[in-house]
Image: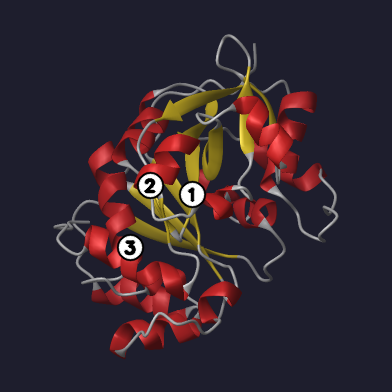
Amino acid sequence: MGTNKRSKTTKAVILARGLGTRMRKRSDANLTGDQAQAAATGVKAMIPIKRPFLDYVMHNLADAGFTDVCLIIGDEHTQVRDYYANEVELTRIRVHFAIQKEPKGTADAVAAAEVFAGNDSFIVINSDNYYPLDAFKALHEQDGAGLAAFDRKVMIEESNVEAARLMGYAIVESDETGNMKTIHEKPNETLMAKFGEHALLSMNCWRFGPSIFEACRKINLSPRGELEITDAVNYDIDNLDADYHVYPCDKPVLDLSCQDDIGSVTERLIDMEVVI
């Protein structure tokens, strides 16, 4: 049994440092006004629905019981810092900031949150995904490290992500007790067929204990030249005696990776009342 047991967590880390290359790439989405301007910056967290996209994510975090959020940003992301530090009224969430100097990968981004996390458990999510409340509740309420994994069939039928794009998402494999065995990155069609239509997909929705920071320091660059959080997780499991439980979720995740996603995400969230 691993050593990462912790009580309910109230801390969340949101990875918002990326370059936004896909979001800045022009498309046929016919964006106008504020959405077009925001997309041109590549800062996906600030794409306006009625209010910045990230506000909707934080609303669900607050509903699930999270009270403190750390945004991993770059020095240049003054718009994000100014908005959450000075412009928006925060009644349920305290927002903190940590700087990732260069976009060197997801493990490097997580490592930037070490001071914020301290010895507490915390969750890590992307800034360009709208996750269901059920996933946040599962990670908030359960002990130990873990991963919320999302049903492929549900994602195809209920999310805004096309089936072809889902082929690029990692498949999570667990044992009979629900502990993660491995993550299959970039699965091919044969592997996808092996796990079937209800294959569990990773959308980078993790719960970590403090050992993840040592793991982030120990790994090497991946073949694509980045420090990958999945490599750090494997190190945590193999060398630091951590167990990662997989929490299946039968609700969809909305993805806001590129300009073509903005319309479908706006349609889903436009009527949502947000309090953060």
Q: Amino acid at mark 1?
A: Ile
Of the numbered discs 2 and 3, the one sitting upstream in the chain is 2
Cα distance in 3D space between marks 1 and 3: 17 Å
Mark 3: secondary structure: helix
Residue nearest the observer in this picture, 66 or 150: 150
Q: Amino acid at mark 3?
A: Val
Q: Amino acid at mark 2?
A: Tyr
Please name the residue that numbered disc 2 is placed on: 131
Between tags 1 and 3, which lies in front? 3
Looking at the image, which residue is at 83% across and 54% down?
221
Mark 1: secondary structure: strand
Residue 65 in view in this figure? no
- Determine whether label 2 and label 1 are within 8 Å by CB: yes
Mark 2: secondary structure: loop
Please name the residue that numbered disc 3 is placed on: 265
Q: Is residue 31 left or right of residue 168?
A: left
Please name the residue that numbered disc 1 is placed on: 125
Percent x, y of residue 15: 52, 58
Asked if residue 131 is positioned above or below residue 210 in the image, the reply reads below
Looking at the image, which residue is at 51% across and 75% down?
23
Q: Which mark is residue 158?
A: none
Point out the image quarter for the C terminus: bottom left
Point out the image quarter for the N terminus: top right
Percent x, y of residue 219: 81, 45
- Determine whether label 1 and label 3 are within 8 Å by CB: no
Cα distance in 3D space between marks 2 and 3: 12 Å
- Quarter occupied by residue 58: bottom left
- Crowding at dot 1, Cα within 10 Å, few <14 / some 14-19 / many 20+, comes out as many
- Quarter occupied by residue 139: top left
Percent x, y of residue 199: 55, 30
